[in-house]
Each structure stands twice: as structure tokens, then as C-alpha cells.
Amino acid sequence: MMKRWIKYFCLLVMLLVSCGTTQKSENDSARVEENAQSHISREECQKLKTFCKNQNLNPDICILVDFSEYSGNERLYIYNLNNNSIVESGRVAHGIGKKGVFSKPSFSNVPESWESSLGRYKTGRMRTLNLPKFNNVPYIEVHGLDSSNSNAHRRGIVIHPGLLTSKKTVTPCEPFSQGCFTVGDETFEAINSLTQNSKKPILLYAYK
């Protein structure tokens, strides 16, 4: 009799362990899938969404630039704030600075520094540059919303095309920028379409 109860007890323990392992596996798989589709935490996503609402920006979508990533990687993300997911991604150059920092960006808000500025921006008008060497080049204005990028408009910081490719490469972004968000043609077209179809400015958030 005792042996039979011990047998039943062991079977019950094995069943409980198996169920727990299956649930853990399902939860781990769900987390992996979520991490593959998202780039920031849910809490950070909600903070950005709230900021957009308070600043009268588009609360549904934004542009993230993760300068902690290597410049050869896709580190600009068009981001859905409603479901915390990446819509599209591409490469973006960082400001080269006066000392020519190819592999790792340095940051400044000082005019003529040629460095990138961190912080939150809002998109402005799409305009066209017409100069002898840069004829009919489109660009999108950005306006700094933080003390770390308050001189962006004064410095002429914009989003413009110019990279040879939008996709991931083993080499750094070329050409380097003087502080602008220089992207590939495909990425620029996606951002321009986003801004043109939005009734409100779009948040661009650059961080490291």
C-alpha cells in the first residue's frame, strides 16, 4: 500500500515539474519574441508616448536613434509607440567632430563643434537645399527640445539623405556628418513619408 502511494506521489511531482517547465518555456519564448520586435522597455515607451501627448506631438509613432550602437549597424528606428515595436530601421551617421571620431561619437550642443547632440527633437518642415555642390537635396528640419540640443536649429542640424546604403555594413557610416542625422535614401523616404502624412510633428529621440 505504502509503495503504491509513493509511486502516485512521484508521478504527481513529475507532472507538476513538467507543467512548470512548459510554462517557463512558453514565457521565455514570449519574452524573446517581444525583445526581437522591440528596442526599448514598455516603461520607456510609455514615457515617450506621454511626452508626445504633453508636447502636442504625434503620440503613435516616433524616431529613435541609439548612438550606443556601432555606426555600421542599423541604429535608427521608426518606432510604433502603441505596441512598442520597430516599424523600420536603417543606418544613421554621427557627427565627426573636429578630431574625426570615426568609430565612436562624442556629443556637444556647441555651434561649429561638428558633433551630434543627444536629446529629444521634433520634426519641422521638409525643404530643399540648392547649392552648387548640393543641388536639389531634400532635408527635414528638426528642433531641439532639451538643453542638450537646444542649438540644433541654429547649428543647421537636419535629417537628410547621403549614406551609400541604409542597410547594415561592417564598415562605419560614410560620409560622416557634421552633426546632422545623415541617412540612406530608403530611410529618408520612409521618414519623409511619415512626417508628410502626420498632422503633428514627430518626436526624434537620440540617446546612448
Image: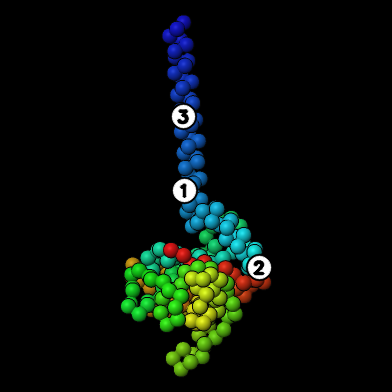
Q: Nearer the viewer, mark 2 or mark 1?
A: 2
Rendering quarter of residue 75: bottom left
Q: Would you say 56 lies left or right of 45 here?
A: right
**Residue drawn 48% across the image and 37% down it:** 24
Q: Is residue 128 above or below residue 12?
A: below
Q: Dot 2, how many residues are within 10 Å of its Cα: few (below 14), some (14-19), or many (20+)? A: few
Measure the alpha-carbon separation of dots 3 and 2: 51 Å
- Residue 144: x and y in percent read 54, 73
Percent from the top left, x then y, of residue 182?
A: 45, 76
Residue 50 placement, left or right of 133: right
Q: Which mark is residue 18?
A: 3
Please tell me which residue lies in front, 1 or 182.
182
Q: Residue furthest front?
A: 147
Q: Identify the disc placed on residue 71.
A: none
Circle 1 SS class: helix
- Crowd band around label 3 with a 10 angstrom C-alpha radius: few (<14), some (14–19), many (20+): few
Q: Secondary structure at mark 2?
A: loop
Determine the residue positioned at 45% across, 24% down.
14
| Residue type, label 2 | Asn
Whether pointer 3 and pointer 1 mark residues with C-beta atoms closer than 8 Å, the reply is no
Residue 74 visible at all: no
Q: SS class of the residue under badge 3?
A: helix
Q: Position of residue 132 (x, y in %)?
A: 46, 94
- Dot placed on the residue nearer the N-terminal end, 2 or 1: 1
Instruction: Tell me the crowding category of disc 1: few under 14, some 14 to 19, or many 20 or more residues within 10 angstroms, Cα based.
Output: few
Decide which of tag 3 and tag 2 comes sooner along the chain: 3
* x 48%, y 52%: residue: 35
Q: Which residue is mark 1?
A: 32
Mark-to-mark CA distance, 2 and 1: 33 Å
Give the residue type at disc 3.
Ser
Left or right for 149, reference 169: right
Q: Which residue is mark 2?
A: 56
